[in-house]
Amino acid sequence: MKISYQEFLSRTQKGMAPPIYIFSGEDEFYKERAVKKLKKLILKQGVDELSFNLFYGEESTGTDIIKAASTPTLTGDRQLVIVRNADRVGISAKAIIKNYSRSPFPPTCLVLLVRKNDYRFGIEVVFALPSEGESITWITKQAREKGWSISPQAALELKEKVGMDTRTLNNEIEKLVLYCRDKKNITPEDIRVLVGDSKEVITSGIISAINKNEAKKALAILKKLSVDEKKTLINAIAWQMRRQGLGWDRFKKGFRSILQAELDFKSERFSPELVLELLVIRLCS
């Protein structure tokens, strides 16, 4: 059974917490809000450690998860068991959880957080990211909830810089609210001053510097990316090169360099940082 976040809120306000919830989708911001709602509903102040268990799918066994879900609390109260990354549990763990779903322990609310739902039981709450058309409305609503307004142009610039990762967007709005504490309106100028460039903007800057053979500038921009972002940068550079419409000779040379970088990554001969620095130097030479 699938329900929306709004229906989940309605059920929670009525004190309803089923034995099994599946929180699916990519909207991590509203997933966290839903988890907080359940904590407020189920957990009693001062006894959280007796009524709450948290697991991570990639680190936990099905036996440990279900043992926690099936064991009554010392106080006899309701309890909450959260499994983050539940789509990363092993095959045997999934089988154990599925078997538990046939006869769950009534005082327990077991919540499985996943991106894609492969479970076929429980009540699924779908947390989809806002669409492109909904993004400005979403940003405006979040600012309004915090007591601020944001102009449509500012909301658009924020979305262009950050993308539609709702948790990151909310964090940026929180920072903007603090920055604009002496006024009640967030403007495009505030976005430009406070919000850093997104990975896409940084990648575009690197490509622009490479096209001008400005290796020093490209390497300086590269340092803005985290290690995880650097690991995905090669494909982004290749995609940008296709869009740039480079001459055939430059295009062939660029892709030879990219293929070499991919081989260096896979062989682990060099660190990801060095692989990308060498790639930039090759592309600029």
Image (tube, rainbow, N blue to C red):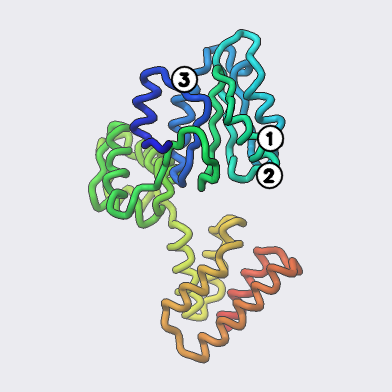
Above or below 15: residue 201: below
> Residue at image x 58%, y 55%?
226
Q: Position of residue 69 (x, y in %)?
A: 62, 24
Looking at the image, do the residues carrying marks 1 and 2 touch, with CB atoms under 8 Å apart? Answer: yes
Q: Residue furthest front?
A: 102
Point out the tag, 1 or 3, that comes first from the N-terminus. 3
Front residue of this view, candidates 52 and 168: 52
Compare marks 3 and 2 and give the one earlier in the sequence: 3
Three-letter code, disc 3:
Lys
In this view, the residue in front, 195 or 64, is: 64
Residue 261 vertical placement versus 160 (above, below): below
The label shown at residue 62 is 1
SS at mark 2 in the image: loop
Q: Say the numbered circle drawn on residue 262.
A: none
Classed neighbour count for the residue bearing mark 2: other residues with Cα under 10 Å, few (<14), some (14–19), many (≥20): some
- Amino acid type at circle 2 is Gly
Q: Quadrant of the N terminus?
A: top left
Q: Are marks 3 and 2 in contact (CB under 8 Å)?
A: no
Which x, y percent locates residue 70?
64, 22
Number of numbered labels in the structure image: 3
Q: Is residue 188 visible?
A: no
At x 32% / y 48%, what residue is drawn?
190
What is the CA distance from the residue labelled 3 to the residue labelled 2? 30 Å
Q: CA distance from mark 1 to mark 3?
A: 26 Å
Cα distance in 3D space between marks 1 and 2: 8 Å
Q: Amino acid at mark 1?
A: Gly
Q: Which residue is mark 2?
A: 90
Q: Quadrant of residue 180?
A: top left
Element at label 1: helix
Residue, disc 3: 40
In this rendering, position of residue 76 left or right of residue 250: right
